[in-house]
Every structure is written in C-alpha cells, then in structure tokens.
Amino acid sequence: MEQLVTPKEKILKKVRQALTFKSKNQFTNIDLDTNVFAKPSSDLSLVEVFAHQFTLVNGEFINCSNHFDFIDKLITLLEQKKWKYFFCWEHHLQDILKDTGIEFSHKRELLEKVQGAITSCEALIARTGTILVSSAANSRTLTIWPPVHIVYAKKSQLVMETKDGMQLVKNRYGKNLPSMLSFITGPSRTADIENTLVIGAHGPTEVFVFIVDDLSRD
C-alpha cells in the first residue's frame, strides 16, 4: 500500500535537501553596507530634516533653544489644551514639571481619564521623522494610550538613520537591551476600513516632539 505523504512532509524534505546540497552563491559581490537612500541636502541640518519628515506625517515639531525655552513652550501648549488629566511617569520628567509648577498625574487608577501624557525617548530618526522609544526608559502605556503624546527629546539624541538610533541604544544599555523597542512615526493611523484614512485608530491622534538643544555652549 502506497504511503501518503503530506504537503508538510514534502516541504520539510525540500528544506532538508536544500540544507544538505547547498548551491554555489552566484552573488558574492553584493554591497549590503552602503546606504541606498539619497543624501539630504547639505544645506539642511539634522533638526531640519527631522522636522520636515515629522510634519509630513502630521507630527507637531517644537524646536527649543534651551531648557527654559522648553518649559515656556510646554506651559503654553498645556494652557491651550486646558487638560485636567495630564500624565507623567518618568521621574526625571516629573522633577522638571514639579520645579515649574505644572500639575500632572501618575495614578494608574485615573488612566482611563488621561487627556495627554509626556515621555522621553531613546532617539529621533531624521530620515523618516521617527521617534524611537523603549520599555527601559518609557512606559508603553503612555506612548499608545493617551489621545495626545508629548515627547521630550534632546538634540544629542538626533541621528540620521535607524541603525544610528539603534547604536545609541546599544551604547546606553550594552548587553542589557530593553525588552521592547518601538518606532513611532506620527500619530496612529489606518486605512484598512473602506480605504479611508483614520487618524488615532490604534493610538494618539496627536504627537508633539519638543527637541531641546543640549549641544550649544551658549
């Protein structure tokens, strides 16, 4: 009686044969290291490249010349929003808010009422206008749950490419990499339903990035 061979077994047989009888690599001179993207104009700084790309995906970019400028612009935004439930869970950001008298909440039992939240980030990727966050520095909850996400970033965290952002993470944590890395490119969106773009479908409807110049000697 002929033994039946399942489709799964046929596939596994082909895989085993491929592993046993490896074909010669015909493409030995492929360059996998050179950047395939066009270089931005030399007239543009990293800040300008990031700002341009970030605003293209409906992000709100605020450039701050120093720490005090950041506080002033943050207070202006909060006064415009008139939020009653503004959340902050990171201790160093809480210290900044406390020093300036900005009221915030950190109580998880009030999270369902959250209107806006502020977090830091690991890096800003200028090429795509992307924010890199991690589970080590930020709460995943505060990057996706609030309707408005505010990001506090420093100019020294700004890099051109994704690989450069990942290198910042490796330099910071070494072998103890965070369990989660997440890339945020503008407000949440989807066009899965009737090909209609919906903002805020799976996360914030607004994303603000405040970038503080920590490199200037002035």
Image (cartoon, helix red, strand yellow):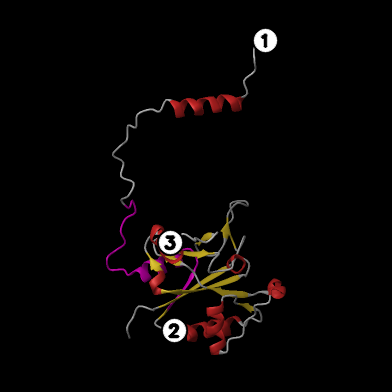
Q: Residues within 10 Å of mark 2 (few under 14, many from 20)?
A: some
Please name whichever residue, 164 or 42, is drawn nearer the observer in this view of the structure: 164
Question: In the rendered view of the protein, which quadrant contains the C terminus?
Answer: bottom left
Q: Which residues are magenta?
A: 35-63
Above or below — where is 30 with respect to 40?
A: above
Q: Label 2 sits on what residue type?
A: His
Q: Residues within 10 Å of mark 3 (few under 14, many from 20)?
A: some
Above or below — where is 28 with respect to 151?
A: above
Q: Earlier in the sequence, mark 1 or mark 2?
A: 1
What residue is at 44 percent from the left and 63 percent from the top?
Answer: 169
What residue is at 70 percent from the left and 71 percent from the top?
Answer: 112
User: Which label number is shown at residue 67?
Assistant: 2
Q: CA distance from mark 3 to mark 1?
A: 59 Å
Q: Which residue is mark 1?
A: 1
Query: Is 98 positioned to the left or the right of 35 in the image?
Result: right
Query: Is 172 positioned to the left or the right of 179 in the image?
Result: left
Q: Which of the 4 image quadrants contains residue 127? A: bottom left
Residue 23 is situated, as x and y percent measured from the top left of the image, at 38, 27
Q: Which of the 4 image quadrants contains residue 203? A: bottom right
Residue 123 is situated, as x and y percent measured from the top left of the image, at 44, 67
What residue is at 63 percent from the left and 23 percent from the top?
Answer: 6
In front: label 1 or label 2? 1
Question: In the rendered view of the protein, which quadrant contains the N terminus?
Answer: top right
Q: Which residue is mark 3?
A: 170
